[in-house]
Amino acid sequence: MTPNPRQRRSRNIFASNMAANGVVCSSKKKIQNGKLILKEVNGKQNVFSEQAKNAQLLETKSSNGRPPKKPDRSKESFEEVPLYTAVMTYLGFYLLMFLGYINQLFFTPKVAMERNRDGYVPLFDRFESFYLRYVYRRVRDCWNQPICGVPGAEVILKDRITKDYGWTFEYTGTYTKCLNLGSYNYLGFAEATGPCAEAAAEAIKTYGCAMCSPVQELGTHPLVLELERTTARFVGTEDAIVFGMGFATNALNLPSLVSPGCLVLSDEKNHASLILGLRLSGATIKVFRHNNVSSLEKLLREAVVYGQPRTRRPWKKILIVVEGVYSMEGSVVRLPDIIRLKKKYKAYLYLDEAHSIGAMGENGRGVLDYHGCDPKDVDILMGTFTKSFASAGGYIAGSKVC
Ligand SMILES: Cc1ncc(COP(=O)(O)O)c(C=O)c1O
C-alpha cells in the first residue's frame, strides 16, 4: 500500500510503539517463566515490564493472605518519538517534496497524461499523481520490496536495483533475510509447512477452496457452520456468522446495523473498513479523540441531551465503534471505561478485534479476555481470521436475540 503523508506520522508512532511493545529487539531482553520481558526502551519501562511488576505485586499480596487485586490495565506506557527523530523525519519528507516539485517543473512525464479532455473533470487527482511519481517513487523500495517466503519472525526479500530512481527495477538474483516488523502473523501459524498448512491443504483437496456464492444463493456448508460454532465458543458469545473477507465484514455489515437517524461515535484512529461501512450506512458520524474516554463521554452526553439536530428528536440508535488494538498505534482500547459509558448512556458497542483476537489476554481471546470483561457487555464483536489465525475472512459474534 502506498503510504501518504497523513499516514506517515502514524507509522512513526507505530514504529515506536512496536519498539515499546517488544517487536524491535534493540532493548535489553530477559526470559522469565518462558515469557520475553523487555526491560527498558530508551530509559523508559515498557508494557511488558509493567505487567510483570503487576504480576509480582499480585503474587506478594496473595501470599500475604489478602485477596489478589486486579491489575489496572487501562494505563498504557508509550515510548515518545524523540524530537530529533521527528524533526529529521519531517525534514527528510519536506526535502523530498521540494525536490519532487523541482523535478516536476523540469521533467514533465510523458506517461499517463490526460489529453483531449477539454471540459472534462480530470481523471487523476493532481496531488496524488505528483506524490506517486515524484515523491513516493524515489523511496518506494523502502516499503515495496517483493517478499518471497512466509511472514514469520524473519522474511526473505528478493533483491533488486534501480538505475532510474525507482521508475523500473532489475532483479539481482540474490536474497536478503530480514527481521519482520511488518506483518500480523502474531501466533506464527502462517507457515508453509506444519500442522496448519497440512490441514489447510487437506481440507482444500477434499472440499475445494470456496463456496463461490453467498449463503442465500447456494446455501452453506458443514465446515462453515462448524467454524461459526467454534468462533462463538472461542470468543464466548451465543453465536457467530463468518464472511469471506475481513474488510467487507466491517464495510458491508455496518450499513445493516445503523442507518440515517442513528448516531455513530467513532474513534479517530478506526480502520478504513469501519469508516467506509459507516459512511455507506448514511448514519451521522461523530469522531472522538483516540482512546479518550472524556471526549467520548462529552459526545454521548450531548447526543442524549440534544438529540438530532433541527428536530431534537432522540437518536434512533447510538453506536460506539472502537478497535481492540489499533493497528497503526499499537494502543489497547480502554474497554472497561467504554463499557461503563455505553451502559450509562444506553448506547450500543461495536468492537473490532482484528488485531487483538488470538494475540491479547491470558487465553488469547482478545481484549475482553485481557481486561477481564464479559463478552455480553459488547453488542457486536467483530474480528478477522487474517492476523493471528493465518487465514482469510472475518466474523461477527454476539447474542442471537438483541
Ligand atoms: C482493525 C481492522 N479491521 C478490519 C481489517 C480488515 O481485515 P482483512 O485484512 O482481513 O480484510 C483490518 C485489516 O488490517 C484491520 O486492521
Image (cartoon, rainbow, N blue to C red):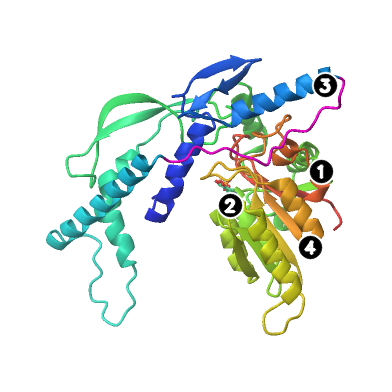
Label 3, on which residue? 62
Separation of residues labelled 1 and 3 (CA atoms): 24 Å
Please state which of residues 206 and 144 is positioned toward the viewer in this rendering: 144
Of labels 4 and 2, earlier in sequence is 2
Q: Nearer the viewer, mark 4 or mark 3?
A: 3
Q: Quadrant of residue 47?
A: top right
Disc 2 or disc 3, which is closer to the eye? Answer: 3
Q: Which residue is mark 2?
A: 247
How far apart marks 1 and 4 lie (CA) works out to 18 Å
Magenta region includes residue 161 = no
Which residue bears the numbered disc 4? 345
Residue 160 position within the rendered picture, expressed as x and y whole percent measured from the top left = 27, 33
Q: How far apart in space, not on screen, are marks 4 and 2 (Cα)?
A: 29 Å
Quarter of the figure with residue 343: bottom right
Mark closer to the chain start, 2 or 3: 3
Disc nearer the start of the sequence (1/4): 4
From the image, state whether disc 1 or disc 3 is nearer to you.
Answer: 3
Q: Mark 3 and ligand 1: say if the CB distance to the nearest ligand atom is below 8 Å.
A: no
